[in-house]
Amino acid sequence: MHDIKYNAVHDEFIVSNPFAQAILTFRGAADGEEPPIRILQGPSTQLSDVQRIDVDPINNELFVPSGGRILVFDRTANGNVEPKRVVSGPNTRLRQVETVAVDPARDMVALGASILPLPRGGGIAIFDRSASGDAKPRAVITGPRTEIYRIIQIRITPKGWMVAAMPGVREEQEPEGAFVGVWHITDNGDVAPRWKLHGPGTTLIKPRGVAINPKNQEVIIADMRLNSVLTFYFPEIF
Amino acid sequence: MILRARSLRSSGPVLLAAVSLGAFAIGILSFSVPGLQPSSFRTRTGQPQLVSIEPLGDEGAMCQWMPASASEPFSMALPQQSSSGASHRATDKIERAPIRVIRDTYPTYSAVALDLQTNEVYLQDENLFGLKVFDRLDNTPPTAAFTEPKRVLGGIETKLEFNCAIYVDPKTGDVYSVNNDTVDHMVVFPRDAKGNVRPMRELRTPHGTFGIAVDEVNQEMSLTVQHDHAVVTYKKDAKDLDHPIRLLQGDHTLLADPHGIAVDTTRKLMFVANHGSRYTPTGERPPEMPAHWPRGRDTEEKPGSGNFTPPSITVYPLQASGDTAPIRVIQGPKTLLNWPATLFVDEQNGELYVANDAGDSVLVFPIDASGDAAPARNISGPRTGIKYPTGVFVDFKNDELWVSNMGNHSATVYPRTADGNVAPLRTIRSAPAGKLALSIGNPGAAEYDTRRDEILVPN
């Protein structure tokens, strides 16, 4: 499992199973060997390289990056179901999408991806939530000032701040320059992060997963090299 | 700041909408506003009245009002942070310590192997990324916090990370260590290596290797590749960018998230333990890709080809390659297989040992088992000390069975023919008695459950 998202409105959590090209939905209190309540899998789904996911509990949709595309399903899709919408094509400027985060309040979706044309490298592309087909992003955050090599997870705060894990070069065990950066969902272009959580004092080495706890103004980070989960107090973004 | 209005009419709708943005407050009332009066002076007018102005708290999310006629959200109609301004903004660098850390500070043992020339046992520590070496006869007293290892290998120079399988060469004592899905290299150390030292040999491997089996007769080694549902075989002395010499992959193989692997050079068979998830790897290999490199992660996946199958052990001819079907499959509810991990073959007695991870057991099958076959022996139960076993090794010299337990920081030893709920002969423990492992393994994400105030961590 490479991702997990909790849907507080419906008290469910969803996980990706990349080895079986499946999206599994469990009830929120699931424990032990309890089976999922829904399994999205099969030829009609077009699922492949399933890594990250996000759920929009307001509009009842699931967003699944798949290669350079975004597949959008009904939240309650079960079995061998076609996506209701696919974002794909040269105008999207998406080459390989690593992660997705939906902002239903602003009706936007943010993607961590490698951005075309090359050799721009990694960045954050922001689309209208309801984008479909060969849609252009409304904004693309990429360039040397961003310091983005790749973005592997994004979470969006109620105020529209995007908290993004930048783990550095994948092949390096302790990559230089890894950080957790914060941009606003209205940012565009070669924009430096507004805040950057990094440095020896944080103890972070290779941050991969990000979660937010707005009530307590906390950011929760899964660090691969530390094999640990760390919680930071981060009131600035809430 | 928000303007709040309350109608004093006994009936009729009240429509009030307000949007607050930063220091500005805009209140839109659909009805006329007679003016604010102290409550003691308000009189019923039959019309809505502005009754209070209160500051908006700076907590929680605000629902954004959007009239039906609006073509875009209100917030987007307001002046945006200009790209030119943002591009010159300074970054606030935050270097603060975490307020809480969830981390298991004790080793957890993913694999076990013995060097019977030195009477030492090697335990793969997949939590702290290292190898711990103990004396074969070490037995942690119940009152002791842990047993100190004789030797420890670990650190960035070793390239050990999420190290999940181990092989000790019975002649040379060389230690082969397989990394899972973060470092795409297998590393080899000399018998007496310790500390933060570089391996004496490295081999680039496909992403997601798990198990290793060495055929000493033919001088070959085979590795399972989880992500691509494949088995790659190299010459035993392969190093650096050497290519695999054989690839077993394809829909007919029934490989499905393969984990453990073992070879029987007497019967010329290869055994593979499968967890059950699979898809169809596809795509053309680019010219720069090595021969016999698996398709899948490095090429393409066939979209929508994923499926779940029950866990299994698939049996092949020893040097099977290509899209070759197994000659036998051990699968079904009687087998009790549940995330089968490491395998070990007893060629002399004709038995197959299985570290049955999620089943908290070690299963022993006849070497010719097939179909929905029950195990001949099943070591499980509270007295055994077995918890999430992922490693198994049979010491024929001393007629003992070793198990490495990911669930409780220990390795446990039994008579080779142990069965049922039996206590171990010895336990090497690396954490206080009763301490269970946190089971965090390569956390790629985290989530906060707002309802239960819990952190969810997928591994």
Image (cartoon, grey):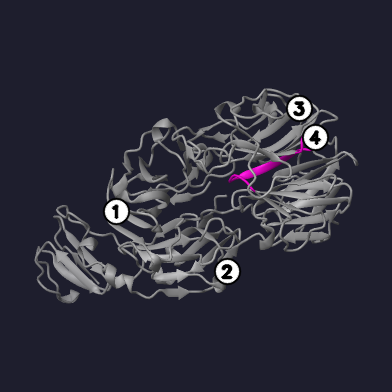
Q: Chain of mark 2?
A: A
Reading the image, the residue beneath label 3 is B268
Of the numbered discs 2 and 1, the one sitting upstream in the chain is: 1
In the structure shown, which secondary structural element does the residue marked by tag 4 occupy? loop
What SS does tag 3 mark?
loop
Of tags 2 and 4, the one toward the viewer is 4
Looking at the image, residue B164 sits to the left or right of residue B79; the answer is right
Which chain is disc 1 placed on? A
The image's mark for residue A203 is 2
Say which mark, if any, is on residue B217. Answer: 4
The magenta span reads: B204-219
Q: Residues within 10 Å of mark 1 (few under 14, many from 20)?
A: some
Foreground: disc 3 or disc 2:
3
Residue that mark 1 sits on: A137
Q: Secondary structure at mark 2?
A: loop
| Kind of residue at disc 3 | Lys
Does residue B452 lie above or below A217 as drawn?
Answer: above
Picture residue at 41% right of the left edge, 50% below the top: A97
Residue located at (75% from left, 44% from top) = B386
Q: The disc labelled 1 sits on which kind of residue?
A: Pro
Of B370 and B387, which appears nearest the observer? B370
Marks 4 and 3, Cα distance to the nearest angstrom?
A: 11 Å
**Is the C-beta separation of discs 1 and 3 under 8 Å?**
no
Mark 1, secondary structure of its residue: loop
Whole-Å distance between the Cαs marked 1 and 4? 59 Å
Does residue B382 appear left or right of residue B77 in this picture? right
Q: CA distance from mark 3 to mark 2?
A: 50 Å
Query: Which marked residue is nearer to the observer: mark 1 or mark 4?
Result: 4
